[in-house]
Image (spheres, rainbow, N blue to C red):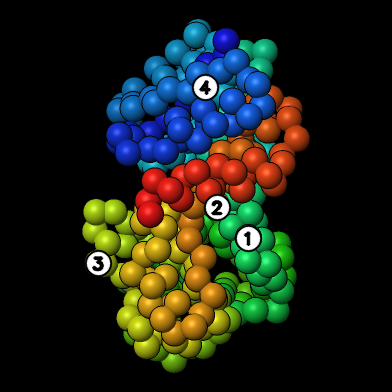
Amino acid sequence: MDFYGLLGEKLSHSLSPTINKMIFEKNHIDGAYKIFEVQKSRLEDFVEAIKLLKVKGFNVTIPYKESIMQHLDYISDEAKRIGAVNTVMLKEDKLYGYNTDYFGIKVMLNSRNIDVKNKTAIILGSGGACKAVITYLLDNEVKNIYIVSRNPEGINLRILDKRVSVINYDELLDIKGELIINTTPLGMYPNIDSCAVNREIVKKFDIAVDLVYNPTETKFLKMAKEESKIAIGGLHMLVGQAVKSQAIFNNMEIKKDLIDYIYKELSKTFN
């Protein structure tokens, strides 16, 4: 049996063990997926333990997606461009880092056949979650990206592209576009009544995307649906990135049927 896991700080509500168990069962993988809650001061010890215990691979979440990079022997070009790693594989005592959030974003947008080419996109929030979103949008020929932050002056995303601008929430009032994406945790369970923007902002866009997956319909997405907009939740992204990670760990084919199956099973949990 091979061992896998999720590295983070507070992981009691993570769905990763459930998702990976389904991946194991559907692909006949003899594996176990564990939670690794690690204090920031013990990250180096954790890395050594992974090598010592021969853990085949692990996913990475807040707050380690950037700090884990200094402990890796190899980082994929995709992860370098994003500036974050969420998937690490152990091979011949060396650690290889990847970013499968990028693939998860693709799965999420493809679930509703969204083409971002020549579109104007608004990204709410400037935390770690937005980096993969920005990279995916730029790679797929988005026209403009406006990153909305309460503190625009304090942002350093290291993205040198003239299509990307950083604005505050007051400036957002004057901007229209096709796509608005929430990368903040606002609206996540149990704080389901919170939202980064009001209805008047949502009305100005055709497509609303929320990286939050619990609940599957956040207040942000509910407003979008009520205004007859396309509304897309974050559960497809969560499942997509997990399946991509196991594809890396076990050199397996990614099947859309598997992603759809896991998505439907998890949706039952929240509805």
Residue 20 spot, x, y in % from top left: 53, 31
CA gap, disc 4 and disc 1: 28 Å
Q: Which residue is mark 2?
A: 236
CA gap, disc 1 and disc 2: 8 Å
CA gap, disc 3 and disc 1: 26 Å
- Residue furthest to the top in view is 52
Which of the 4 quarters of the picture holds residue 17?
top left
User: Taking 243 as reference, is 123 above or below it?
Assistant: below
Q: Residue at x 48, y 56 (%)?
A: 234
Q: Secondary structure at mark 3?
A: loop
Closer to the camera in the image, 249 or 226: 226
CA gap, disc 4 and disc 2: 21 Å
Q: Which residue is mark 4?
A: 4
155 left or right of 73? left
User: Taking 218 as reference, is 59 above or below it?
Assistant: above
Closer to the camera in the image, 222 or 152: 222
What's the residue type where badge 4 is placed? Answer: Tyr
Residue 262 spot, x, y in % from top left: 55, 42
Q: How many marks?
A: 4
Q: Which residue is mark 1?
A: 111
Residue 195 spot, x, y in % from top left: 31, 70
What's the residue type where badge 3 is placed? Answer: Asp
Closer to the camera in the image, 267 or 68: 267
Q: Which residue is mark 3?
A: 193
> Which quadrant does the N terminus fall into?
top right
Q: Secondary structure at mark 4?
A: strand
Q: Are marks 1 and 2 in contact (CB under 8 Å)?
A: yes
CA gap, disc 3 and disc 2: 22 Å
Q: Are marks 3 and 4 in contact (CB under 8 Å)?
A: no
Q: Secondary structure at mark 1?
A: loop
